[in-house]
Amino acid sequence: MTQRRIPAVFMRGGTANAIVFHQKDLPADRKLWDDIFLAATGSPDPYGRQLDGMGGGYTAVSKVCVIGPPTRDDADIDYTFAQIPIKEQRVEYAANCGNMSSAMGPFAVDEGLVPMPDANGEALVRIHNTNTKKIIHARFPLINGCAAVDGELEIPGIAGRGAPVRLEFIAPGGAATGKLLPTGHVRDTLDVPGVGRIEVSMIDAANPCVFVRASDVGLKGCEPPAEVEANSEVMRKFAAIRCTASVAMGITRDVAEAATRLSNPAIGYVGPPQDYTQSSGGQLKAIDIDITGRMIARGQAHRDMPLTRTLCMAVASRITGSIVHEATRATNNPDAELRIGMPAGVITAAAEVRLVEGQWVANRGSFLRTQRRLFEGSVLVRGSSAAFA
């Protein structure tokens, strides 16, 4: 049986890659999307390499984005994100990818979906992320009506420089659970099987996270990701804490279900500013960062920082009494940018968080990213795929 061609663009957004489809080029029956996405990326692959597809054998590059017309008046486009597990035959829609969010505005402009009145001005694209039901504003420069690519912004984890894309996540609190503080508390003590009692902060901003002190799981917080992944006892603890937190946050009914839903929540571990060696080999000094932060996402120690999880960490850093706030360098300016020391270097985020009538409210969070269209044409999917049977 011949292969099916589906128009697509392969893009980098921040420190992630994804296949980007127009919604109009996919079946109207969304139940058929999963088989197409799995076939396009090369999942499931028991060897973990996805060589028979466009995935790259790592969570940061096994992604699909779908862009369609807006279903909200305050948006210019709808954006649906799909995370494709590498070894499993399923597709996850529970969370957004902040890094790929940075490519969605440029994609929409370059595809002619959102007209721009000034071909050489600044674009504003209002993005409705259907996964979280949240609005993201993307601002970026235009050159001759297209999104600029060349620029002077350098982000850790990406070689070279590019044009900046400013992402503003509007009212990011409660993206998955409906509450910024799902348990109603800034800090909780969880009784985790096989770990014991441990203090955590469970925050839901852009995507839900559970944060722990690095020292409480036997780490400093600046260890290389490969070293953390090789420590089976630490990874076991992280998995157990994540599953217990998932139930406490109301994301899953029990730890058995939590063990199968790896996207949410992610687990972050933090420490105070400290000197360490970056993944590039360079030395980072404690004076140049406000906190040391790391993330475990989908059972992997992230090589940089997932953007929505970075936003969640930034929001948590401004909530007095949280585990993250405790580790953050003190500041008199609650709106100051937060410099997070991560494996690849320093990522900077800003979060506007206020205590209103005794309740913490996250008004917005923002970042700068770069993006680039890498390939455009068609993705070939086997005609024998279940979607075309």
Image: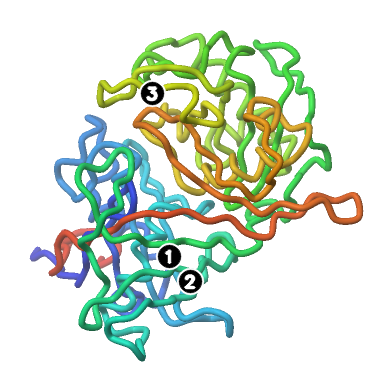
Residue 89 location, quadrant: top left
Which residue was labeled with disc 3? 284
The structure residue drawn at horizontal position 28% and vertical position 51%, both measured from the top left corner, is 17
Quadrant occupied by the N terminus: bottom left
Structural crowding at the residue carrying mark 1, measured as other residues with C-alpha within 10 Å and reported as few (<14), some (14–19) or many (≥20):
few
- Callout 1–callout 3 Cβ contact below 8 Å: no
Of residues 318 and 20, the one drawn nearer to the viewer in this rendering: 318
For marks 1 and 3, the one nearer the N-term is: 1
For marks 1 and 2, the one nearer the N-term is: 1
On the picture, is 199 further left or further right than 105? Answer: right
Residue type at mark 3? Leu
**Disc on res. 127:** 2
Residue 310 higher or lower than 1, as above or below: above
Of residues 87 and 296, the one drawn nearer to the viewer in this rendering: 296
Residue type at mark 1? Lys
Of residues 270 and 189, the one drawn nearer to the viewer in this rendering: 270
Q: Residue 315, position in %: x, y?
A: 64, 45
